[in-house]
Amino acid sequence: MTALADTWGINAAQFWLRGQRPDREVGYDDATGMWEVHGYPEILRALSDPATFSSNTQRLVPEASGFSEGNLTQLDPPDHQKLRKLVSHAFTPKVVADLEPRIAVELMGQMQDRAELVADLAYPLPVIVIAELLGVPAGDRDKFKRWVDGMFNSTNKISIKDRSPEDEAYFASAMEQVGELANYLTEHVRERRAKPREDLLSKLVEAEVDGVRLTDAEITNFGMVLLVAGHITTTMLLGNTLLCLDAHPDQFAVVRADRSRVPAAIEESLRFLSPFAAVSRVTTEETELGGVRIPADQMLLLWIAAANRDPRQFADPNAFDVTRDPNPQLGFGRGIHFCLGAPLARLEGKVALNLLLDRFPQLRTDPDDAPEFLPSPNMTGVRRLPLLL
Ligand code: HEM
C-alpha cells in the first residue's frame, strides 16, 4: 500500500494512506492552531454531539461568514433541522432517480481507444447532473470549473493562525471565486422568483415549512454548497473507484464477474480513498475527546479518511476488499450532517461504473501515463486518470 500511495503521488500529509497511524488519535497541531482527530470512535463521538462540536466554524474564520446564511454545512440545531427539512422537500429520492437516464446519455460520449477519465467523464458527468438538477445551463461548466478549482488549489494545510502572505493571497483569491459563483447563482434565483420552472432552484424558491420560506441569500448559498460539494467529490469518487479496481486485479475480477457488487465496490472506494478527507467542527465548551481535554472555541479537523483506516474499526484496513461487510465507512460523514447528496453520488457511481464496464470490457489504466491526484491535503482524489479502453 505504501508503494501505491507513493506511486500515485498522494500528498504526504495523508500518512494513513501509507499504512501509518498517528502517534495519538487526538492532538493539537501547533503549526495550524487546530486539533487533529484521526480515530474512528473519536470522530464518531464528535459527529454525534453537535451541541459540543459545532459546525459553525465560520465564527472562527469571520472572513468567510458572508456566505453562511443557508449554508447547511455550517448550521447547528435547531436551525439546521429547519433548513434540512426545507431543502429535503426539493431534493427527494424521486428527483434523484429521475436523473438516471440523463446520466446514461452523458456516458454515451466520445470515448474511443483512449480516454482521460476525469476530463472525458468523471468531471463533466456530475457537473452536468448537478447543473441539470439546479436548473442552470450545463454549458456554463467551464465557469464552475474555474471558480471551484480556485477554491481548492492550495497544497498547504489550512491554518487559523499566523497565516503567511501566501496563505492570505490564496484565501483572498478563493473568496473572490466564491463571490463570483454567488453572483451567478443569485441572478438565477431572482429569475426563478419572477418565473418559476421545473428545477431545484424553483422548488427551493417555492419550498415552505411552517409558513417559512427561504431568502435569496439562503438559496444562493445552498446552491453553492450543492454545486461545490456535489461535483468534485463525485468526480473523485468515480476516478478513485476505477483506480482502486485497476490496482487490485483480483477485486476487479470479482466485480466484473458479479455486477451486483458494484455498490459495495463504491463503498469500499469511499473508505479506501475518501474524497472528502476531513470535516471541521468547533468546540462550544471545554470537553474531552479520546482522553484529551480540549478547551472551548477550538477548531477541530476530523480526518474521516484516516478514521476509515482505523484498525480498531476495520479488520485489515489497508486492504481494498470489495467483499467487506459490514462497511461502516465515514466517507459521507455521519449524524445530522450526513451527506444529503449520498444517494445521488452512489447512483452516479453505480450507473457510470456499470456502463463503463459494459462498454469497455478491457478497460485499464495507462501504464505509461501515471494518474495525478488533487494537491490539497483535505481532498483525496484523482484529477487526471489516463485509461486504455
Ligand atoms: C455533506 C461527502 C456528494 C451535498 C457531506 C459531508 C460529507 C460529504 C463528508 C458531511 C460534512 C460535515 O459533516 O461537515 C461527500 C462525498 C460525495 C458527496 C464523498 C461524493 C462521493 C454530494 C453530492 C451532493 C452533496 C452529489 C449534492 C448534490 C451535500 C450537502 C451536505 C453534504 C448539501 C450538507 C448536509 C448537512 O450539512 O446537513 N458530504 N458528498 N454531496 N453533502 Fe456531500
Image (spheres, rainbow, N blue to C red):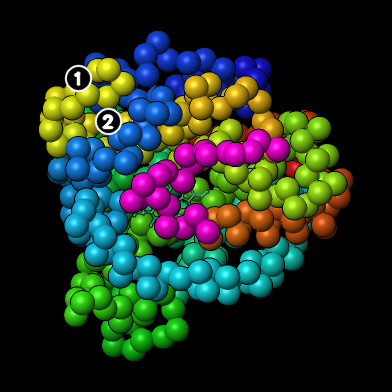
Q: Residues within 10 Å of mark 1 (few under 14, many from 20)?
A: few
Q: Locate the N terminus and report the quarter of the image it occupies.
A: top right
Which residue is depicted at the point 49% across and 64% down?
130
* Relative to 347, 159 lies left or right: left
Amino acid under disc 1: Arg
Q: Considering depth in this image, is 16 or 120 the residue closer to the camera?
A: 16
The spot of residue 160 in percent (x, y) is 21, 30
* Picture layout, residue 367 above or below residue 89: above
Mark 1, secondary structure of its residue: strand
Amino acid of disc 2 = Leu
Q: Going from the N terminus, do you reach mark 1 or mark 2 first?
A: 1
Locate residue 29 relative to residue 358 in the image: left or right: left
**Bounds of the magenta segment:** 323-343
State yes or no: discs 1 and 2 in contact (Cβ < 8 Å): no
Residue visible at 35% across and 64% down in the picture: 223
From the image, tell me which residue sits under label 1.
293
Of all residues, the one furthest to the front in this rendering is: 326
The residue that appears at 86% across and 50% down in the rendered structure is: 361
When the figure is inspected, residue 308 is found, relative to residue 293, above or below; the finding is below
Residue 258 appears anywhere in the view: yes
Quickly name the residue at label 2: 300
Answer left or right for 185 relative to 6: left
Q: Main SS of the magenta segment?
A: loop
As measured in the structure, the alpha-carbon distance from the residue carrying label 1 to the one carrying label 2 is 13 Å
Residue 132 in view, yes or no: no
Residue at (69, 70) in percent of width and height: 105
